[in-house]
Amino acid sequence: MLELVLQARCFGRLSMTAFLALVYLEQPITLSMPDTQFAATYELGQYQSAVEAEVTALNDQNFTSRFWQKDATLWTQDAAAQDSIRSFMGWLRSPEVMLKAVPEIMDFVHEVQQAGFQHVVVMGMGGSTMAPIVFQRSFQQGTTSLPLSILDTTDPGTVAALEATLPLEHTLFIVASKSGTTAEPLAFGDYFYDKVKAIKGEKAGENFVAITDPGSKFVTQATAEGYRHIFLNFAEVGGRFSALTYFGLVPAALYGIDIAALIQGGVDMMGNCGANGPVAGNPGLLLGTALGVLAKQGRDKLTLITPDSLSSVGLWLEQLLAESTGKEGKGILPVAGEPLGTPEEYGTDRVFVYLGYEREADQANQQKLHALVAAGHPVITIRLKEPLDLGSEFYRWEIAVAVVGIVLGINPFDQPNVQAAKTATDALMKVVTEQGKLPAPGEPAASQDGVSYYTKVSGADATAVLQAFFAQAQPGDFMTLQAYLHESDKLNEELAQFRKLVQDKLRIATTSGYGPRFLHSTGQYHKGGPNKGLFVQFTADHPQDLPLPGRTYTFGTFENAQAQGDLDALHQYDRRTLHLHLGPNPEQGLQSVLAALPAALGKLG
Ligand SMILES: O=P(O)(O)OC[C@H]1O[C@H](O)[C@H](O)[C@@H](O)[C@@H]1O
């Protein structure tokens, strides 16, 4: 059967009737309107008709006008949940609102340049740093702009390594926290404020900027400490929907990105998604409907394929998808950073999304994607002209996950299970305050080469424990690596090797994230999504720990408590876990685990 291909460009010029007429034809169709920027291709095979039916059903219910009127009955009939949903839809107008704020942001950029700063560090977690990470990794630094670093980990080795690269006296620190209560950014802020104060005394505040919500407690602290500037974000925008607000745009502008053009992309996408009145087609609706329908039919692992130049988008998308959809035992698992394979390597639980540039042919991935389409896997392709198109892309995906929420029947704007890990961590930190240290872990199931293996299953040695752990895998499961470690190229390679060995043998999806970053991102799905995960947590010793000013604990203890707290939370949700404490040298420790893994997997059927 021929696959149906719809080149979904310029929906604004294509009536929905024409669109539906075209998608019903049983032959490949390419609509070529190269003057627009919202290029997406849907190759959905056997799922095409179900997606069309859902788009029609949503349009029959006046989806677009109800959506823009924030009609929360689209998502739920529960009155309290409806109030909550409405209160998180401020992001819908964020591109329009922020376009007006461009002169204010650019005035600030000039002020910073004239003050002689040499480096910018953005410090925060989750939605407050994901977009800056993408900007820093996807764009070239502007010629007259400042280098940008992002700190979103409590790992003392990482904090120390960053500190060693900074001209502290000439570094601008941006403490970014929407709520102003998240423990990590407050710790980062206090740590570096103390350092700068040791150099500049009472003038330390000149080097600090806050981005937060109006009225947050952090505003009081930042004011008292004489912060150079406090950006008050506008209300009703959840963290993962804040890329095109001060959280993304202030760092972007300091890095030299043309933020007016970036935001304009978002404004254009707003229009295409019906912000200014009825539209014949809606790129966000189509993407969200396709992903929602596919997830309901078991294709609930969104496998993101990008060229290297866009790989960081995976981090942003992970948070948006996992926190928005991973709840009530449902959800779409974002799978980023898995090299693309051949059709036999995948189960029937995948949908592939290729996000690339028009100018990069990326033949190797394209050939594999063609083979996947031919084998019946759904593939969605989105091509950008240039990095600035990320402005419209962020917006398309934000609309899409809101639509996924409708299709799956969940509230896409809350993150009810993130708190579980925070609560467990807080309880552990209380123990640290009272007893000076964390509770000792129980007996390991095995120890080998200085690596301790903690898990509920047992085995005579490391290989046997790994075998017993992975014997629990079922088709449709996934494995996730959770590394509370100092990121390095070597570790990234080793983690990729771990994923490959497991994927090749068990044919399950694999993901990987550094802690505590992922706690504010995919952590919601881990606890709130379907119970299909095999969780492998890595921790290590902290030979060079760092004290935290005004606290009785160090960065290292904080990181350990976060790892232990999340493990406790995963157990509350009855998840299958394996904790590997890698000892003093994590790269070497992981090497030892990798040496045992092939034999362990080899013994499985
Ligand atoms: O910006 P903040 O209020 O500090 O929040 C940072 C992050 O915290 C939590 O973990 C939420 O689950 C995330 O959605 C949020 O982005």
Image (cartoon, helix red, strand yellow):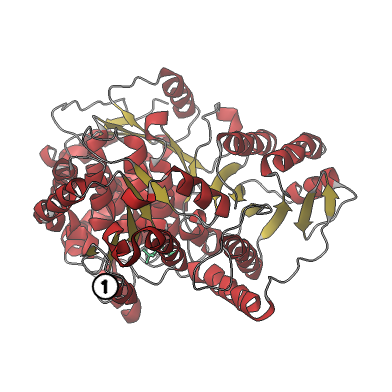
Residue toward you, 392 or 478? 392
Residue at 23% x, 35% y: name it: 142
Q: Quadrant of ligand 1?
A: bottom left
418 to 136, vertically: above or below? below
> Which image quarter is the C terminus in?
top right
User: In the displayed structure, does residue 599 sit left or right of residue 94?
Assistant: right
Q: Secondary structure at mark 1?
A: helix
Q: Is residue 378 visible?
A: yes
Quarter of image, res 181: bottom left
> Which image quarter is the N terminus in?
top left
Residue at 66% x, 67% y: name it: 571
* Amino acid tagged 1: Thr
Q: Position of residue 52 (x, y in %)?
A: 30, 45
Residue toward you, 442 or 95? 442
226 to 530, vertically: above or below? below
Q: Position of residue 492 (x, y in %)?
A: 57, 37
Disc tally is 1
Q: Is residue 316 visible?
A: no
Quarter of image, res 568: bottom right
Q: Position of residue 281 (x, y in %)?
A: 18, 45
Considering every residue shown, the one lying at the far right of the view is 460
Q: Position of residue 597 (x, y in %)?
A: 76, 38
User: In the displayed structure, does residue 87 sit left or right of residue 593?
Assistant: left
User: In the displayed structure, does residue 22 sit left or right of residue 360?
Assistant: left
User: In the rendered image, which residue does mark 1 sit on?
Assistant: 223
Confirm if mark 1 falls within 8 A of ligand 1: no
